[in-house]
Amino acid sequence: MQLRYNYRAYPDTAQRRALASAFGCARVVWNDCLRDRKQAHAAGLPYVKSAELSRLRITQAKRTAERAWLADVSAVVLQQSLRDLDTAYKNFFDSLKGKRRGRKVGPPRYKSKKDTRQSIRLNTNAFCLQDDGTVYVAKVGNLEVKWSRRLPAAPTSLTVAKDSCGRYFLSFVVDTEPDILPESESDAGIDLGLSAFAVLSDGRKIDSPRFLRRAEKKLKRLQRELSRKAKGSKNRAKARIKVARQHAKVADRRRDFHHKASTQIIRDNQAVYVEDLAVSGLGRTRLAKSVHDAGWSAFTRMLEYKAARHGRIFAKVDRAFPSSQVCSACGFRDGPKPLHVRGWTCGECGTVHDRDHNAARNVLFEGRRIVAAGRAETPNASWSAGKTGTRARTAR
């Protein structure tokens, strides 16, 4: 299976200029090739092949006065930009034909030099790991890297990215074998929420850290300072970076919390079942800020790929399953309840339930039934349900 490992890089001034040039050249090649395909489509001409675009927009463009600076960066950067455009078109066509799962994918769009995130992709011909701990990138130099952990194997590709607050990251894709954990006798159903981030079927609760809510006061102050700066001024650019850094801190803390919580759950349980929530729909309600602050989708994806990596069972329970309406003791359906009702008594057997704990137990029972049936309940459920050691998508 493929995993992605991210590390912070610290390029010097000359290397920053070289990376900025590489970002710009990759963007220009993307836009030129995209423009050719859009114009051909508008004129009713056949789809322009990649080989033709590579010849026109990379090889021949370097010999012209307008695009001579394309030769200043590695040719691998330009070729990978064209391959990324091909991948974007393939995802778009597969989405139109129904071959791609999930939400519909739109057609590729033009890139702007004002985008807050810039990146280039390299294969093994354009980078290598040095013995002194640096990473050599073609026509950039040896980049100093903060190795927070070791790579489990030789990387197959590298993405150099600059985020909105000016930080540089190296993202390696590595092919690894599944790391199967010793079998555990326990399994868990998980009910995700806002008052508590997650409630497990055994009664454990994971408190919601509310990283965005805790940083709101400082974010409001920084945003006010940004709004007072004149557009296009250097002070406005500095104020924008301050806001971006604060948002990056919130995102980093949330990601770290998700990783630690998901790893602990996967290590403790042989099977994990979670409800497939309609996060995009909840993100349009009055609870939108709290829903996005919780980050349920990212947490669920981590559970999914870690289960596949460590030989655990993972399944999603359909979002239409009435986990909060059914008594986990007798199975009596007691009807819908408003969100402010956190506890209720079953009208059939008289059992007093905590709303979240009861929902987690129902998710556990439904997940067991799905896995016992040997299939996913709905198309929304995980394709890895009932399987162990299966291939997962590239995850960080």
Image: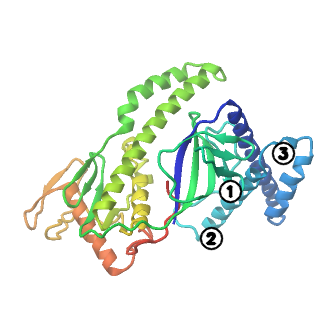
Classify mark 3: residues with Cα within 10 Å, few (<14), some (14-19) or many (20+): some
Relative vertical location of residue 65 with respect to residue 52 in this rendering, above or below: above
Rendered location of residue 224, percent (x, y) = 49, 22
Q: Which mark is residue 71?
A: 3
Query: x%, y% of residue 329?
Result: 14, 68
Residue 97 - label? 2
Residue 48 visible (yes or no): no
Q: Residue furthest left?
A: 350
Q: Residue at x 79, y 54 (%)?
A: 33
The answer to which image quadrant residue 51 occupies is: bottom right
Residue type pointed to by label 2: Lys
**Residue closer to the observer: 112 or 10:** 10
Residue 123: give its label: 1
Image x and y of residue 6, in percent: 53, 48
In the picture provided, is 262 more to the left or to the right than 144? left
Residue, x 57% and y 67% (percent of image)?
100
Q: Secondary structure at mark 1?
A: strand
Labelled disc at residue 94: none
Which tag, 3 or 2, sits closer to the chain's start? 3
User: Residue sitting at 48 percent across and 24 percent down?
Assistant: 222
Q: Nearer the viewer, residue 40 or 273?
A: 273
Label 2 to label 1, Cα distance in Å? 30 Å
Count of numbered badges drawn on the protein: 3
Amino acid on which the number 3 mark rests in the picture: Ala
Relative to 98, residue 68 above or below:
above
> Which three-letter amino acid code belongs to the residue tagged 1?
Asn
